[in-house]
Image (spheres, grey):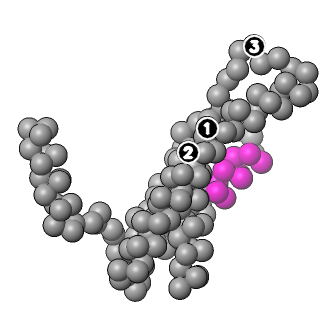
Amino acid sequence: MRSNFLKNFCEFEKKGGTFPLISYQFKWIGWAIAISAVAALISVKILDSSQAAFYKQLFMHALLIGLFMIVITKDKDEDERINELRYRAFSFAFVLGTAMVLLMPLAAMVLDALAGRLPLEWEQDQSVFFIMSSFLFYYLMYFQIFKRQL
């Protein structure tokens, strides 16, 4: 079964199949979700309720869903150039995001050492939210930069 799925996927890719994107109208829904989630995160920080940790996690995930929705929507004028820019932006976002994930802990250790604190139990404070949001932001940033260069 597993090899059958991989075989079908490879055949689809050989025929020039691309990842199916959703309609461009969903971009506004994604922006609404992302902006609402940011506003809700700010209000959770200001109000400081007893269940703040739960709401913080909930709205952080809503923000990721909104950003992901923006990323997988088509442009209004989707063509081959836009697809090429999309793939370039994904590759740049992957490389920059991976570099940040790998270099930030090293930078934190160096700064701790310079400050005289020995990191005996060094913790990686790189949550799923940080990693995913940085990849999505990098992609959106590079995609917009590349589109403006057309």
Dot 3: element: loop
State whether residue 73 is above or below residue 116.
Answer: below
- Indicate the quadrant where residue 109 lies: top right
Q: Nearer the viewer, residue 102 or 19?
A: 102
Mark sitting earlier along the chain (2/3): 2
Kindly identify which numbered label has been placed on residue 98. Answer: 2
Q: Position of residue 67 (x, y in %)?
A: 51, 60
Q: From mark 2 to mark 3, how far is it between C-alphas?
A: 25 Å
> Which stretch did the figure color magenta?
38-46
Dot 1: element: helix
Q: Which residue is mark 3?
A: 120
* Prevailing secondary structure class for the magenta stretch in the rendered image: helix
Mark 3 closeness class: few <14, some 14–19, many ≥20 residues within 10 Å: few
Number of residue marks: 3
Q: What residue is rendered at 21% in x and 60% in y?
A: 13
Q: Position of residue 14 (x, y in %)?
A: 18, 62
Mark 1 closeness class: few <14, some 14–19, many ≥20 residues within 10 Å: few
Kindly identify which numbered label has been placed on residue 102. Answer: 1
**Residue 135 in view of the camera:** no
Dot 2: element: helix
**Residue 45 among those drawn in magenta:** yes
Name which residue type carries label 2: Thr
Residue farthest along the top direction in this orientation: 120
- Indicate the quadrant where residue 69 lies: bottom left
